[in-house]
Image: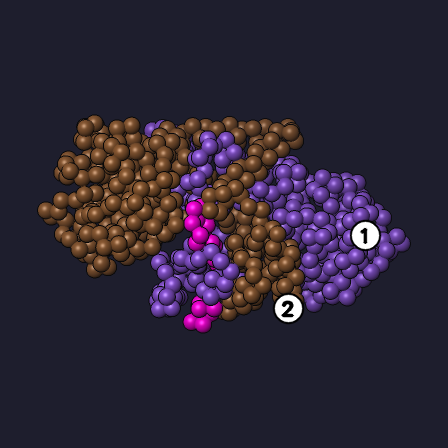
Chain colours: A purple, B brown
Amino acid sequence: MSDPEPRLTGPVLVVGAGLLGTSIALALRRADVDVALSDVSREHVRIASGLGAANLTAAGVRPELVVVAVPPDALGTEIAAALQVHPQAVVTDVGSVKTDPLLEALEVAGEQAGGRYVGGHPMAGSERSGPLAASDSLFDGRPWAVTPHAGSRPEATELVLALVEVCGATAVRLGPEEHDQAVARTSHLPHLLAALVAGRLADAPEGHLVLSGQGVRDVTRIAAGDPALWQQIVLANTTALTALLRDVRDDVDTLLAAIGHRDREALADILHRGVRGTAAIPGKHGGLPTPVATVFVTLADHPGELARLFADAGEVGVNIEDLRIDHDPARDYGLAEVSVAASAADHLLTSLETRGWTVHR
Amino acid sequence: MSDPEPRLTGPVLVVGAGLLGTSIALALRRADVDVALSDVSREHVRIASGLGAANLTAAGVRPELVVVAVPPDALGTEIAAALQVHPQAVVTDVGSVKTDPLLEALEVAGEQAGGRYVGGHPMAGSERSGPLAASDSLFDGRPWAVTPHAGSRPEATELVLALVEVCGATAVRLGPEEHDQAVARTSHLPHLLAALVAGRLADAPEGHLVLSGQGVRDVTRIAAGDPALWQQIVLANTTALTALLRDVRDDVDTLLAAIGHRDREALADILHRGVRGTAAIPGKHGGLPTPVATVFVTLADHPGELARLFADAGEVGVNIEDLRIDHDPARDYGLAEVSVAASAADHLLTSLETRGWTVHR
């Protein structure tokens, strides 16, 4: 992205004082930009203001930029309202889906006013919601999709890119339809299939789940997300999701036939395509996936053990890329699964063994 | 499990010197049990022996226990062969599926000899394979399913439980059919659906995957597993998997209909069942899932930062239950997602802030 110098001067009106809205307001205040907050819940505004998220009252403010941070169902209406109520302001939002709210807003506010709207979608969140969960560093280093439509004015896009910059995020520019197709694939479909795998666990006979390993925990983790929110997200992105779900249904039929006919080739095709898919996810810092290797370390389950492990790894100059702790269902120790650059794995293994750790690859 | 005192005296013959077979042999040697190794690959036997995995040659050995650690396709044949060639020995295996190999072995070796067979399945592995990846601590603290069939002799089961104990694992006793149903649900179905989600990424237009977050990475991670091995596992567990895949196909149809008719109730049902499923996975140490809370910490991407974080957490007495590093695709720092007991989260947050960390929940 070739960002311009930030030129956001404010004031900014944030509509919706939930997790995302309040966090944006806090990030703006961190940069000394004037902020006003509004929300249907007075309590939310009071809490967010108490956290220092606003220094102006919403009544009478003439914002340079309005950030609409409301639930998916209300997006189109609130974007249109912001365009109409603030005829000088640029308007953006933080919704997970871009096409439907855009069409709704253009229909209500008109094409002319719609030129001041540029969609946005920060890739950040938390299991928690509401203003108390907010933080001025929520977006630090996260991707933030910026989705100008055909009628968006260039200077409106520049202002939204400046907001992303102030929030410490990294702008990713996409068209609205392209964005919705991308998140259907990278977020909404994974969520739905995780829910289906988890749903089969909910039906499991007692005692079967004791064999659950790290794999199924990873696959199902996101299925714990708020159903009320996900229901709205899914119903706001039906076109892209329907196409993908039909492909998945075809794949399931292919799997059933392959298993029924013991067709090794058909099964192998699906498994190999899965391997290619995991390799296609971009690596750290947007580069190509870097080869990483895993080192397993046995560790006692009490405070300080991981500190000692990380101190030892740091001392021998190995940067730990990722770590998971695989809990043992029956013992008082765990296995740390430490991911490092493939080129550093042997060095780490030997170094840790020398320092008395029980290690294997 | 009410384990007896281990009474494994050896010698043990391990058939198959891959990752699992060699690791079992190493664990037995660690406990001073005599071990012989065989494999169709002389190279594998040579490497494993070089690692200290065997102290006897396979020719002429009279084993107390034979451990069959061969690929799924060869299990039934090799279990039957072990029962026939070693008429005094108890026989077990480490295969991911139990019913089909059992039926095949009983058919070849007969019901009488089959009394000496008790299946096993350690829940351990690695992305790597072969004897060089082996470790005597591979099974430390892992669940290990022990699956006596209707005709298994009690003393054979006791001997296999003793093997699990020597390897440092935790025995989970299940019938063979029950085991296969359990792993279809907790391992094989998650693998296949992870492969379907990942498969849709392999098809993605260029640039769409830059929006990939931690969620899709977690869902698809296991889909990187070896297709040749998974092809065999899936085809050895067709009955249980077919039933589950049909349920999934019905779910996908329900989803498509719910999305097509904007049926919020039907969609909510599936999402809520997913939430229940994630909550049903047993927690640490086999207990009920413990409430955990997440604290996010911004950290620079160089050696020593995590060490400093863990040292600080350890100093204030907080035990870190799990940690993930959420990589930023474009910047030189990351977000550590630190899971701790819900009761300790606020204390950790305050303590880390006091020590200068950028933290939020």
- As drawn, the residue found furthest toward the front would be B5
Dot 2, how many residues are within 10 Å of its Cα: few (below 14), some (14-19), or many (20+)?
few
Say which chain tag 1 marks.
A
Q: Residue B176 appears at what percent x and percent y?
A: 33, 32
* Range of magenta residues: A311-333
Q: Is residue B301 magenta?
A: no
- Image quarter of residue B133: bottom left
Q: Secondary structure at mark 2?
A: loop
| Side of A63 relative to B295 (left or right) | right
Q: Decide: is A341 above or below A68.
A: below
- Do the residues at pointers 1 and 2 share their chain? no
Q: Quadrant of the C terminus of chain A?
A: bottom left
Visible in this render: residue A91? no
Q: Residue at x 42, y 40 (%)?
A: A211
Q: Quadrant of the N terminus of chain A?
A: bottom right
- As drawn, the residue found furthest toward the right would be A60
| Residue carrying label 1 | A46
Q: Is residue A328 magenta?
A: yes
Q: Residue at x 44, y 35 (%)?
A: A207
Visible in this render: residue B2? yes
Q: Residue B96 appears at what percent x and percent y?
A: 33, 40
